Image (cartoon, rainbow, N blue to C red):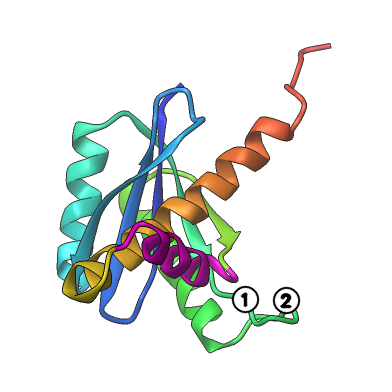
Amino acid sequence: MGKILGIDHGDKRFGIALSDAGQLIATPRQVATGEEALWEAIGTLVKEEDIEAVVVGLPLNMDGSEGPRARKVIEFSREVEKRTGLPVKAWDERLSSFEAESALTEAGIHGDRRKERVDMVAAQIILQGYLDHLDKEPPVTDG
């Protein structure tokens, strides 16, 4: 099994997380500032790590509908798929930034360090939600 790359897509900053090879635990990896840095980070991780899929946080509206930000992320997901050749899954990210803020508050992280970490922790939360979902699905058998 390969690792899964998780991305929290923002306007300026992009949080990046990575699963372990067993696809059980998501770990915050880095924050890329700007799209050029994001594509460079994705390229490096795909080259250096055994990545088999990408999960991108989908910012749905609270009622579950897609707004302009969600459509932008869907377009970004298609571009990731095209550039990497990897399957890309969109995963509901509602409340992930809120959860990340709460986790950092509990950890006592404030100020500039906090801004840098929110996106990375949000990516971890998105990816962990996806991994937990995978863990609950029954295994596929050949019959």
Q: Is residue 53 above or below residue 76?
A: above
The residue closer to the viewer here, 30 or 70, is: 30
Q: Which residue is mark 1?
A: 60
The image shows residue 112 at horizontal and vertical percentages of: 17, 74
Residue 69 has which mark? none
- Quadrant (top left, top right, bottom left, bottom right) of the C terminus: top right
Camera-nearest residue between 91 and 101:
101
Is there CB contact under 8 Å for labels 1 and 2?
A: yes
Q: Residues within 10 Å of mark 2 (few under 14, many from 20)?
A: few
Which type of secondary structure does the marked residue at label 1 adopt?
Answer: loop
Residue furthest right in the image? 143
Q: Which region is colored magenta?
A: 94-108
Image: 93 above or below 10: above
Classify 107 as above or below 131. Answer: below
60 or 29: which is nearer to us? 29
As for residue 105 lying within the magenta part, the answer is yes
Q: Which residue is mark 2?
A: 64
Q: At 23% from the left edge and 61% from the top edge, which residue is drawn?
A: 31
Task: Say which amino acid is labelled 2.
Answer: Gly
**Label 2's element?**
loop
Position in image of residue 6 (x %, y %) = 41, 51
**Closer to us: 18 or 73:** 18
Magenta-drawn stretch contains 9:
no
How far across and how far down the image is residue 129, in percent?
58, 49
Left or right: 81 in relation to 48: right
